[in-house]
Amino acid sequence: MIRFRLKELIANKEFEEGRKVTLEEVAQGTGIHRTTLSKIANQRGYTTNTDVLDRLCTYFGVSLDKVAEHLQP
């Protein structure tokens, strides 16, 4: 299963910048619909496409392994 680390990325950004970061802000910065971000953050087993992953990597300035990880069953 793939586990998305969006909540961790947002928490890290909040810590680094010393302010609250909302899904709406991430949505505006990435062009990804807020509902999609909410599903990535909260829905176990949610699937998405590589374009979304690429946009998240670019927005947070991280590599793919920081956005998602593969968990062994």
Image: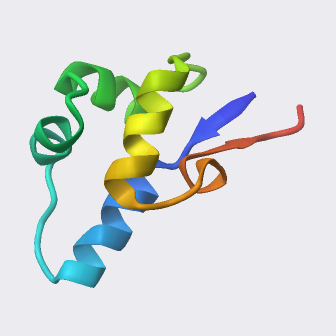
Task: Work out whether residue 32 or residue 36 is closer to the camera in this orientation and state it.
Answer: 32
> Quarter of the image holding residue 71?
top right
Left or right: residue 7 versus residue 35 is: right
Colour scheme of this structure image? rainbow
Is residue 43 visible in this depiction of the protein?
Answer: no
Q: Residue at x 19, y 80 (%)?
A: 17
Residue 10 at x, y percent in the picture: 32, 59
Is residue 40 visible in this depiction of the protein?
Answer: yes
Q: How many marks?
A: 0
Q: Residue at x 32, y 51 (%)?
A: 59
Q: Residue at x 24, y 38 (%)?
A: 30
Q: Residue furthest right?
A: 73
Task: Work out whether residue 10 or residue 45 is closer to the camera in this orientation and state it.
Answer: 10
> Quarter of the image holding residue 40?
top left
Q: Is residue 39 above or below residue 68?
A: above
Q: Is residue 32 above or below residue 49?
A: below
Residue 19 at x, y percent in the picture: 11, 75
